[in-house]
Image (cartoon, rainbow, N blue to C red):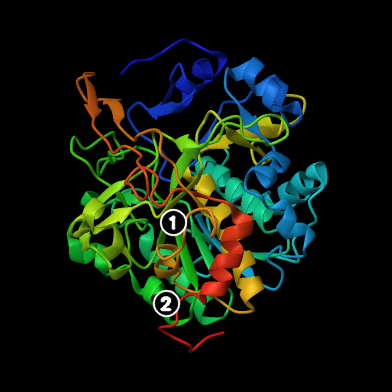
Amino acid sequence: MNRGRLTAAALGAAAIGMTVMANGEQHPNTEAARPLAHEVPHAAALLSPPTTAECLQIFGFRCYRPAQLERAYDLTSLHRAGIDGSGRTILIVDSFGSPTIANDLRVFDRTFGIPDPPDLEIRQDAGRVPAFDPNNGDMAGWADETTLDVEWSHVFAPGARIVLEETPVSETEGVQGFPEIVKAENYAIDHGMADVISQSFGATEQTFPTADSLLDLRSSFSNARRHRVTVIASSGDTGAAGLLPDSQCCYQQRAIEWPSSDPLVTSIGGTRLHLDRAGDRTQPDTVWQDGGGGLSVVFKRPSFQHTVADVVGKRRGIPDVSMSAATDGAVVTYHTFLPSDDATQDGPWHIISGTSEGAPEFAGIVAMADQLAGRRLGHINKALYSLDYGRDGLVDVTVGNNTFSFLDMHDNTVTLPGFAAAAGYDLASGLGTVDAARLVRALAASGGDQGDTSAP
């Protein structure tokens, strides 16, 4: 691997198994947490929420606050018009959760002038979660993920109710942890507690023992389809590659992650935003090189992708759309679940990146579209692939690729060729990124999934 210059971020990243490249991107060295979020290491400057300029000075790359992404994704006009997800519920599912998320969200909101959500309900319907251990890196990683999911879904849809389902077993690679996730999702769907589900986790398709062992875990997605609940998942953070069964990096052939690869799910890939301090673009969005994208080895091409058959062939292709994910452009979060979060030590403000960011953000967009439509839109993929660029809120991404380099077990550099962005649909950015104000209205007008009307 080309290791790049040794920045302050790189010094801290070594402690968490990450390499920071010269352009500010991070790559797994030998293993990566299965929640798809990456926290930039603690620094004294994070005693307060950093500005873009401060992140450039300290880390050598940009970070963004809520107001910048609100402007970049054209959320302000929606929120001013009262289209903020009111009356709708975002379900977030994470292993273990975070013991401080309720307080952390309140402080985050107060700092950035965001109204508190109508309700944040924390549930454990798949079984009691073990007591949080701050020395357990797996639990801390999931608490990071929970923080990102809750705070940034709320940035995008501040009027939406949030239900957090915490599950008691960590999802890693393959089947482990998924039965509990499925149980929690089915409970929430059956009890009317979800309009849109955000999933910021995944496992490489090839890590499942058999295709049937993966297909046996789809009951909550079929249930969501029947109840017209939209399901969203992050596409992954290893570019065109995929982690091995032991979570080491990586298969030496192209691979993608499930549940993002599921045709019943809307897959969210990664872009890099180029913003100034006000949130205005200094250049168009580009592909985040680590964003997951490619072709499924389990699922055939779904009907909604027939219009892009020249790109996907006979297989399901991901992502469907892409949102902010790059480390150079990470978002600010607030958490206090670790002793080092104390203001006398490192501070409670952090910056996090990964396609984990995109899933909750897009969930907020769907919640607003549900609100405007006056009902659940359900499975939105057919509607997405029928929209026009520009007029309907799709914004083409034409620069970048998801070629991925990593070190194998012998410390040899392996470069796995990925997919390049191009005009229209591609396997690096999907349909591209979005202008939320236009997309919300276009999705609401589409009517969503008309195949089932058994639920509102």
Instruction: Locate residue 146, reporting x and y percent.
Output: 57, 50
Tags 2 and 1 touching, CB below 8 Å: no
Q: Quadrant of residue 331?
A: top right
Instruction: Locate residue 363, reporting x and y percent.
Output: 56, 59
Q: For numbered disc 2, what is the local secondary structure?
A: helix
- Is residue 39 at all visible to an observer of this figure? yes
Q: Residue at x 57, y 31 (%)?
A: 274
Please tell me which residue lies in front, 193 or 288: 288
Quadrant of the rendering where the N terminus is positioned: top left
What residue did someone put label 2 on?
Answer: 225
Q: Residue at x 73, y 63 (%)?
A: 159
Instruction: Locate residue 349, reporting x and y percent.
Output: 69, 33
What residue did someone put label 1 on?
Answer: 233
Q: How many numbered badges does the structure rendering display?
A: 2
Query: Measured along the vertical axis of the image, is residue 43 above or below residue 292?
Result: above
Q: Would residue 169 appear left or right of 63 to someone viewing this image?
A: left
Q: Amino acid at mark 1?
A: Ala
Q: Amino acid at mark 2?
A: Arg
The label on residue 222 is none
Instruction: Locate residue 420, reporting x and y percent.
Output: 31, 37
Please tell me which residue lies in front, 430 or 99: 430
Q: Quadrant of residue 440?
A: bottom right
* Mark 2 / mark 1, whichever is N-terminal: 2
Q: Residue at x 70, y 26 (%)?
A: 46
